[in-house]
Amino acid sequence: MIKFEDVSRIYDGQKRAALANINVEIAKGEFVFLVGGSGSGKSTFLRLVLREFRSTAGRVFVAGKNLSELPERKIPALRREIGMVSQDFRLLPGKTVFENVAFALQVIGKAKSHIRRVVPETLELVGLGDKSDRRPDELSGGEQQRVAIARAFVNRPKIILADEPTGNLDPETSVGIMKLLDRINRADTTVVMATHDWAMVDQMRKRVIELEDGHMVRDQVRGIYGARA
Amino acid sequence: MRHTLSETISGLRRNIGMTLAVVVTMWVSLSLFGAGLIAAQQVDRFKGEWYDKIEISVFLCTKVTQGDNCDPGQDVTESEKALVEETIKANPEVDEVYFETKEQAFAQFQEVFANSPTAEAMTVDQMQESFRVKLKDPNYYQGLVSQVQNLPGVQNVQDLHTYLDPIFRWLSALQWGTIGLSVLLLLAAALQISNTIRMATFTRGKEIGIMRLVGASNFYIMVPFLLESLVAAIAGALLAGVSLAAGVWLIIIRNAQASLKGLRWIGWPETGLTIAVVFAVAIVLSVLPTLVSARRYLRV
């Protein structure tokens, strides 16, 4: 589903590579933790998958597309196969929960009837079936993140990218979010989650890819946060 | 589509101040621009009309006239006359030439100064013979004038260009000044639009970010901005069109045409054409800066 072939990324005006010679393959339906300190290259990794920019060297494949050669006009199609969840939720404050989730479908031109069917379904899935008329500021952080996950998942993407999704949440709430992502993963969605949350990583025993200064220092099946095999 | 429309409307409302500024700038600059265009068409008409009537008069020497090429106290000789006529006819720009005799000149003089003591004081012999020349293109008069005016026996070459040219020069300076000024204002309007779009991309930054993240097409993201500036520009163009039509009606149709009937004034067809040009300019000037700044600020 995601494949990095000797990928490096150097930002303009910088000498040090944000990512250096990364080789990794993530299969369909896998759940992967991306761990490492701040500035280790986790975000760069995710942004390369989203094709927010191209790799400086090497090739990135996502959902069968070679992103190094993907023309700019095909980027929207790529992003419709990816759902993105971030630390700061990024909800629109003026819209209700329903509208926030529906927005993702509206702007890619989905029919109203489709939206009316799929959005409640998805809200039910994330456990917010009864809150669809609330506004984001009436919700707790965990609930807001569930809305964001619903929005990322509502178009049934092949991949969910989560950048520190529990970074602003307390441990208990985080477990709920984690379980939700796990459930989405079991529906055959590939999930890549960048995180600092070592307790979570240790508990879940999923594949762990660790980055340090842009280099991949570990790729471990059923790994834990700290230890290196 | 519904989302697009509601985004456009809320965008217009959110930036109501900027939108009004764009509308007013567009209005003033397009009105000036249109006025310049209308003035240009009117001046062209006058020019065509007056230049058509212009003929060059080559006055020949008499015993009493004085001039550089005249022998004092001598009439123009037949051979001199022949040379002048030959020179005129040889010029490729000449369309028609006829000779006005002293008698014809006297008759005309009597007509013009009828009931005036001057008419009685003059005799046929004091009149001047002249060649009257009509050119194919009245704009190219200088060649003939310079060819003829130094020939012996030619007392004076008169042509109305000497009087009309400064008038038309001023008129065209005025009309180009107007157009130039309006172009500056239009430039300001275009910059204002691109600035408005820039601000709008900031205020809608979050929406735009999400749209890009979930894979909305660039076109979809851009349409509300395009519609927003189009609406502003077309509002400005409408106001300018009404102003121009009102101006033409008040100045030309109601007043000038009524009081100066002899002249060929422009009318509604020319005004309509000008307004169409104004609309085209408005659309280009709103779409272009929007596309440019949207490309800049809405990058994927």
Image (cartoon, coloured by chain):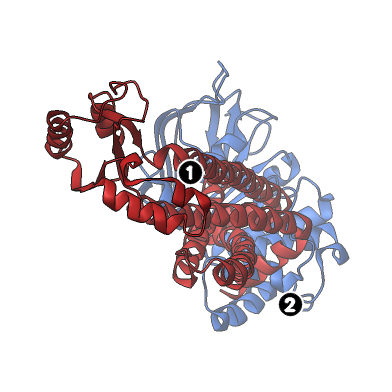
Packing grade of label 1 (10 A; few <14, some 14-19, many >=20) is some
Q: Which chain is blue?
A: A
In-front residue for pair A200/B270: B270
In-front residue for pair B193/B108: B108
List the residue tagged with mark 1.
B168
Work out whether residue B291 can be spotted.
yes
Which mark lies nearer to you, 1 or 2?
1
The residue drawn where x is 61% and y is 81% is A116
Which chain hosts label 2?
A
Circle 2 SS class: loop
Circle 1 SS class: helix
**In the picture, residue B111 is in which quadrant?**
bottom left
Packing grade of label 2 (10 A; few <14, some 14-19, many >=20) is some
Distance from disc 1 to disc 2, alpha carbons, whole Å, reads 79 Å
Spot occupied by residue B232 in the image (x, y as percentages of width and height): 64, 61
Spot occupied by residue B208 in the image (x, y as percentages of width and height): 63, 54
The residue drawn where x is 31% and y is 41% is B125
Spot occupied by residue A160 in the image (x, y as percentages of width and height): 57, 55
The residue drawn where x is 48% and y is 65% is B265
Q: Are marks 1 and 2 on the same chain?
A: no
Badge 1 amino acid:
Phe
Spot occupied by residue A216 in the image (x, y as percentages of width and height): 53, 28
Q: Which chain is red?
A: B
List the residue tagged with mark 2.
A129
Badge 2 amino acid:
Gly
Asked if marks 1 and 2 touch (Cβ < 8 Å), the reply is: no
